Image (cartoon, rainbow, N blue to C red):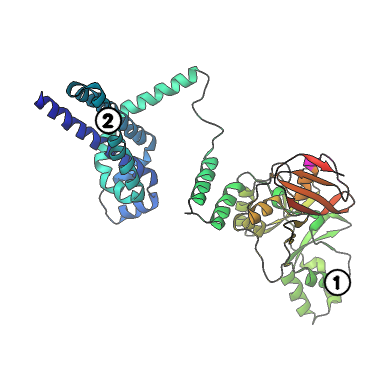
Amino acid sequence: MSSGSGLIGGALVALLILSAFAAAVRASLWNASRTRLGELQKRGVRGAGTALDLLATEDRTMGALALAKLLAALLAGGLAAFLLFHQLPPLQAGLGGLVMIAAFAFFGLMLPDAYAARRADRVAVTLSRPAQLLTAILGPPATALEVLARGLLTLTGSSGVDETHTMHEELREAIDLHVKDGTVVKNDRDMLSGILAMQDLEVADIMVHRTKMTMLDIEEDPKDIVNTVLKSGHTRIPVWKDTPDNIIGVLHAKNLFAALQKHAGDASKVDIEDILLPPWFVPDTRAIPDQLNAFLKRKSHFAIVVDEYGEVQGLVTLEDIIEEIVGDIKDEHDAVATGVRPKPDGSYLVDGSVAIRDLNRAFDWDLPDEEANTIAGLVIHEARMIPEVGQAFVFHGFRFEILKKRRHQITALRMSPVKREGELAEG
């Protein structure tokens, strides 16, 4: 019986090594950088190319490694139970089994997983060749089991794919997780989240609305046009004729000042229409990534936004898209105020046109922006009415008090955090 026990003990050690190997390879491939592995391959490091080959068939590789860990655990459990219950009394055998399970879990799973995750590239390169052999052996049965599982899911009416959990959601969860453990700072989180959020945004979500646009009437006196350009601080300004919806061109400050220099500073001799750039109209429903690509392809970064009826809705610039990633960009001509003024009592005076995403980014809030782009739009949406000055509402953890209105537009309000989120209105 002693020789048999020795064989079982040796088998248990071999299964422990198999489990540790599979766990280490899986963790290293999961965390390895394809870019760094490619650089190692170019430098002639043995195993780097094999690791890339394993990643190229990631589903098959991961399935084989998972099957290896499962088989090791099942066989080790069976052999350990046979050995213990034939050598020891039931109570001692049970306690011994718990100890062996803990040891197998620590040395065969957790420890190699943690080690490989911290040295992913090195471990992936070192273990790639034996991992390739293991994948060749267990890959076919792992693939067969996966096909069988998908077939059963199809029979039960499930596609086998969680459509509600997209790749972008997984990335957002990973970013939030790293923010919590301190490996990613808030500014980096905001930039990464901004890149992901762009996929769900349209031009209408980030454009400068027509009510905030600086525009010029071609019929104005050239001197007044020059003064407007100087006061605005903008490089490009749309120019209209007869009606603001009839944009005939874009006035570039550089062209204007060149014309002034040509005429010795006499604005009355400048023909504004001759120096206009042709306007570029884009639909308000265009996706932000598509508009970014259009800016880069056209080598331009200013466009007029129109709706389906051709009416001007606003303007969008390359800077607007970049600000969705890096946050508000300030230069020497931008106003110091951002539309939000914190008060000593903990409240905030907010312009109604401030974007909800800007507030969330600046103060780490979580106000919803699915139904409205601006804070004024959010209040109107939640209140289901156009509030009057003096009215106040409580929702999403804040008290919103209407301070100013212009016609039907909320221009200023006060936001005060509240302890308990509610849905109520105050007179």
Q: Residue furthest bottom?
A: 264
| Count of picture labels | 2
Task: Name the residue carrying label 2.
Answer: 72
Q: Does residue 285 appear left or right of residue 83 in this picture?
A: right
383, 190: nearer the viewer: 383
Mark 1 Cα within 10 Å, few/some/many (few <14, many 20+)? some
- Measured from the top left, where is residue 63 in percent x and y? 36, 32
79, 66: nearer the viewer: 79
Amino acid type, callout 2: Ala
Magenta stretch, residue numbers: 381-387
Residue 384: say if magenta. yes
Q: Earlier in the sequence, mark 2 or mark 1?
A: 2
Q: Which dot marks residue 370?
A: none
The span from disc 2 to disc 1 (Cα, nearest Å) is 84 Å
Secondary element under disc 2, as helix, strand or loop, is helix
Label 2 close to label 1 by CB (< 8 Å)? no
- Measured from the top left, where is residue 396 in percent x and y? 71, 43
7, 40: nearer the viewer: 7
27, 279: nearer the viewer: 27
- Measured from the top left, where is residue 105 in percent x and y? 31, 36
Please tell me in which quadrant of the rendered image residue 172 appears: top right
At 77% from the left edge and 41% from the top edge, which residue is drawn? 382
2 vs 1, front mark: 2
Task: Name the residue carrying label 1.
Answer: 222
For the N terminus, the image quarter is top left
- Measured from the top left, where is residue 300 in percent x and y? 65, 59
